Amino acid sequence: MSQPQTPSRRAFLKTSAGAAGGLMLGGLPGILSARQAPAYVTSDASRPLASWGLQIGDMLDDRAMIWSRADRASRFFVEWSLDPSFSTVRRVGGVHALETSDFTARVDLAGLPPGRDIYLRTTFESLDSEGAASEPVLGSFRTRGVADRGVRFVWGGDTCGQGWGINPDDGGMRCYEAMRAVNPDFFLHSGDTIYADGVMSPSVALADGSTWRNAFLDVVPEKTKVAETLQEYHRAYLYNLYDDNVRRFNSQVPQIWQWDDHEVVNNWSPGKDLSNNTLYTEKRVQTLVGNAAKACLDYSPMRHHDATESERIYRKIPHGETLDVFVLDMRSYRAANSDNRQTEPGADTVYMGSKQIAWLKAQLLKSTATWKIIAADMPIGLNVPDGTDSQGRAVFENSSNGDGPVLGREFEIAEILSFIKHAGIRNTVWLTADVHYCAAHYYNPQQAQFSDFDPFWEFVAGPLHAGTFGPNVLDNTFGPQLKFQKVPPAGQSNLPPSANYQFFGQIDIDRRTRELTVAFKDSTGAVVYTKSLAPEIR
């Protein structure tokens, strides 16, 4: 498990969070409460505001991405120190935050020492008024140590979906506070980081007679319609940052982001047809994808890929000798959603694409980490439906397509699983979200229609803050066995976050034995399931 917070970091977090009535850590000054004016109002209108906190992302051995946002054109600076009093400070940055990025900016903070608490202080300096700087935003995190140690991380997906926004009466996005409380080394967001297609109303009547209240729609009115323009996609991300729990979490926990469909529009693929969808005036899906991709890259704390493919999301994030995380993109390269039952692989069965699959194989072969986490934005063995086609056939969102044999997009999954077996790659675990309930699946070749693979586990977490659904139907192609699931009571769906069917996953890897333990927890932090896996040593 992760190392405990040092006394100096505990004191720093407590002091920072206690400032300004609990509104300092993570850029909380200036954020409107649900009922009040800004908690901090500068006396000098020329000073930028940085009220949406900071984010830490894609942490490597000696570096991490530091992200923040201002309210106007400005320059972004990051100060970091090994001392919570900032007695010795290094200052980097000067990155321009301009309207084209919705005034967001990032710095790749390099040269960090291993195994140390890093204290952050970020500011924006005005382009118009010399010397006018924002109130500083504070944060901290711990770098990976040189000496091998245990690892703890959390994962999940589905944030602010199905019209369930920030409700202060219910404590806001409570899963984020529950995740922060376990002091993870990092957080893996498995996709649906926003719901660009999710329209919010100021209030929603609940089945028990109470009312769900969506706050902050007065300051982010764009969330009362679907996102179509770049600004509307930007604002979908901005809305989430009005939540106290999210900002506090962001300021302390390094993140790894994926994306899926709701960053653009529900179940999007090149064949998405919006011609009869009255919510959209922009019917060109690729135009929506372009706006959505830029907004995602602007707001994510992700290290951008090089100029050969600047919008690439799939990547590897190592965590020492213990763990490698292989982040997949099952959305950007796919062919149009279809009945997915083609008997031969071809252009219409592409899911991740040959280039990404070749990259994954090469990275798995090179990995010397004990555990290889394959972070997928969709599950392997659950049918995820997408309506019907013109012939009345069921259309599928992911690789599953009903029961076996291998058909359609499943050819790519079969290729990967067979490669892992024949290359002798051990200790792979698949993590995902997407289906809005939590589940544990054991894939057994002896129970499968396609059996040329070694057994493995897939763990499904979520939603973090969205409607709860399920269960989905298992596809027997790769022999998944249901070991656990927690879903709404029969006949109920789209339960609000207040129903406490929100789930995140937590993984602990023991420092000495390298045993990996998975836990599913609800938004109160209560454990609903655990499973321990011993590593297979070659």
Image (tube, grey):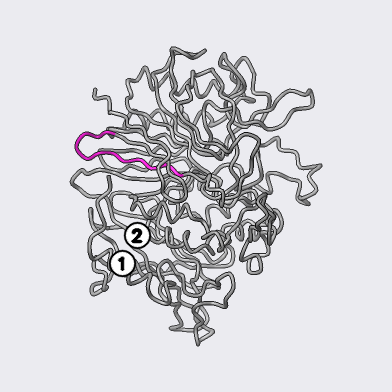
Residues under numbered marks 2 and 1 in contact, where contact means CB atoms less than 8 Å apart: yes
Q: Which amino acid, mark 2?
A: Leu
Q: CA distance from mark 2 to mark 1?
A: 9 Å
| Residue 253, image quadrant | bottom left
Toward the front, the furthest residue is 208
Instruction: Give the camera-side residue of 488 and 192.
Output: 488
Question: Mark 2, mark 1: which one is toward the viewer?
Answer: 1
Instruction: Give the camera-side residue of 13 and 503.
Output: 503
Query: Is 468 placed above or below 381 here?
Result: below
| Residue 123, image quadrant | bottom left
Tell me which numbered mark, 2 or 1, is placed earlier along the sequence.
1
Residue 313, x across and y down, in percent: 49, 43
Describe residue 534's horizontal placement relative to residue 399 as left or right: left
Identify residue for label 2.
Answer: 109
Instruction: Give the camera-side residue of 307 and 379.
Output: 379
Query: Is 151 placed above or below 114 here?
Result: above
Q: Residues within 10 Å of mark 1 (few under 14, many from 20)?
A: many
Residue 510, x across and y down, in percent: 25, 39
Magenta segment boundaries in residue numbering:
504-515
Q: Which amino acid, mark 1?
A: Trp
Query: Is 37 placed above or below 274 here?
Result: below
The kind of secondary structure element at disc 1 is strand
- Residue at horizontal 61 percent and vertical 66 percent from the top: 216
Describe residue 232's horizontal placement relative to residue 508 as left or right: right
Describe residue 175's horizontal placement relative to residue 498 as left or right: left
- The circle drawn on residue 80 is 1
